[in-house]
Each structure stands twice: as structure tokens, then as C-alpha cells.
Image: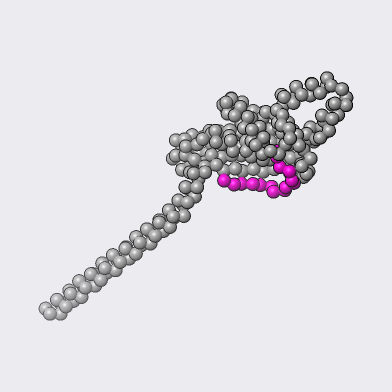
Amino acid sequence: MILTNTAAKRQGLIRTICRAALIILSIGAAALNFGCSVRSVATSVPSRIFREVHGLRVRSYQLTPVTDDLRAYRRVEIHALENLMLDEIPELTVKQLNVEIINRTRSLNRFESITQGDQATDAAKRIADRSDTEAVTAGSSPELIVEGSIDDYTPGIPALRYIEQGNNHAVLTVRIRLKDKETARTLGEMNITVENTRVTSNVERMVERAADEVAKFAARTTRYNTPVEARY
């Protein structure tokens, strides 16, 4: 009878030890998972905060690399972008984009003279009415033409952007071409895409950023051969 009690006690002790071991293992596993979760949150939060604060990502690539030195161009003629998206983009947004391109080009103080396409046509008519000498003087310095098109636009869907943590982006894509006015030779061409990754997108801010990128491309003075640019 004594041996039976001893065996029972041993079995009870073994069961207790097993339970304790299982509890310890469970606590360890939980602690490990918690640590991984905390580390995952810690690493993802900065990028999310950055995305929510800045919200704009620019991707651009060259269709025709700029190989000429553009410092000689002190005059520029900016044409309104051709709207390939038709009624899919609001007319007000198109107007804002064209106006912002001119304003931001002026703010860079790169050119001595900046004219719009329609203004340039009127100026050409006035020059034609002057004497040949005056026309030669007026056209003595090379002039840069900035033209292009709106190739893509979507405002995104805010509800889906919230559910997908910002993946339903608002997108604006423009194609910009730089040309020599006298020879009509293409000096460079670039595709510029601005994505707004914020849950609450601001199309106006996206348009301003796109116009800023266009102005910088038009106002460049040096060659460059970088095939792709992607930045926030």
C-alpha cells in the first residue's frame, strides 16, 4: 500500500512538472510573439507616419535624355498641356496645372522671358509687322518650347484608400517635351508621375507638385543621364 501511494505521488509530481513546463513554454512563446509584434510596429510606424505627413511620391523617367547644354536658352515659350484624359479630369484641375507650371517656372528665375503659347502667337504676328532688322534682333537668342500632355489621372477612392491603408492612390501623369523653337528639334522628353498616398488625398497639392517637377525639368541647365528618378 505504501508503494502504491509513492507511485501516485511520483505521477502527480510528474504531471505538475509537465504543467509547469507547458506554462513556461506558453509564456515564452507569447513573449516572443509580442516582441516580434512590437518590433514590426516599431519598424512600420515611421514609414506610415512619413507617408501620411508627406503623402506625395514622384516617379519620373526620361523618354529622350537631355544631352544638350541648355544654358543658352534664356527665353521660354510654355504651351498648355494637351488633355488626353478628356472629361475624366476636371477642367478646373487642368487649368490649375497649366497656370502652376507657368508660375513655378517664373519663380525659379531661370529665364529672362516667359510667354504662353497663345501670347507667343500674338507676339509672332507683331514681329512680322516690324522691319526685318527688328525681327532679327528679337529672335537673336534661342528660345525653348515646353509642351506636352496629360497622360493619366485618377483621384482615387478615399474609402478604398482607407481600407487598403493608402494603396488606392490618386495619380497624375504628364509627359513633357523640350524643343528648340527655331529648329523644332526635341531636346529632351520626360514622363512625370505624382502619386498621392494619403488616406485623405489632396488633388490640388498633387497638381502643384507635378507643376513643380515640370518647371524644374524645363529650367534645367545641364545634361544628365539618370534613367529613373523615384522620390518622396
Horizontal and vertical percent position of residue 188: 74, 40
Q: Which residue is outermost to the top?
A: 129
**In the displayed structure image, the side of residue 203 where residue 4 appears, left or right:** left
Q: Is residue 192 visible?
A: no
Residue range of the region highlighted in magenta in the rendering: 218-232
Q: Which residue is outermost to the bottom?
A: 3
**In the displayed structure image, the side of residue 36 where residue 71 appears, left or right:** right
Horizontal and vertical percent position of residue 40: 44, 55
Is-magenta flag for residue 105?
Answer: no
Q: Main secondary structure of the magenta part?
A: loop
Q: Residue at x 29, y 68 (%)?
A: 21
Q: Residue at x 76, y 42 (%)?
A: 71
Q: Residue at x 76, y 37 (%)?
A: 74
Q: How is the image coloured?
A: one colour
Horizontal and vertical percent position of residue 95: 61, 27
Horizontal and vertical percent position of residue 119: 72, 24
From the viewer's side, name the closer residue of 62 and 213: 213
From the viewer's side, name the closer residue of 44 and 131: 131
Q: Is residue 25 visible?
A: yes
From the viewer's side, name the closer residue of 46 and 124: 124
Looking at the picture, does residue 30 appear above or below residue 143? below
Q: Which residue is outermost to the left?
A: 1
- Quarter containing the N terminus: bottom left
The quadrant holding residue 180 is top right
Is-magenta flag for residue 222?
Answer: yes
Total numbered circles = 0
The quadrant holding residue 118 is top right
Looking at the picture, does residue 228 appear above or below residue 103? below
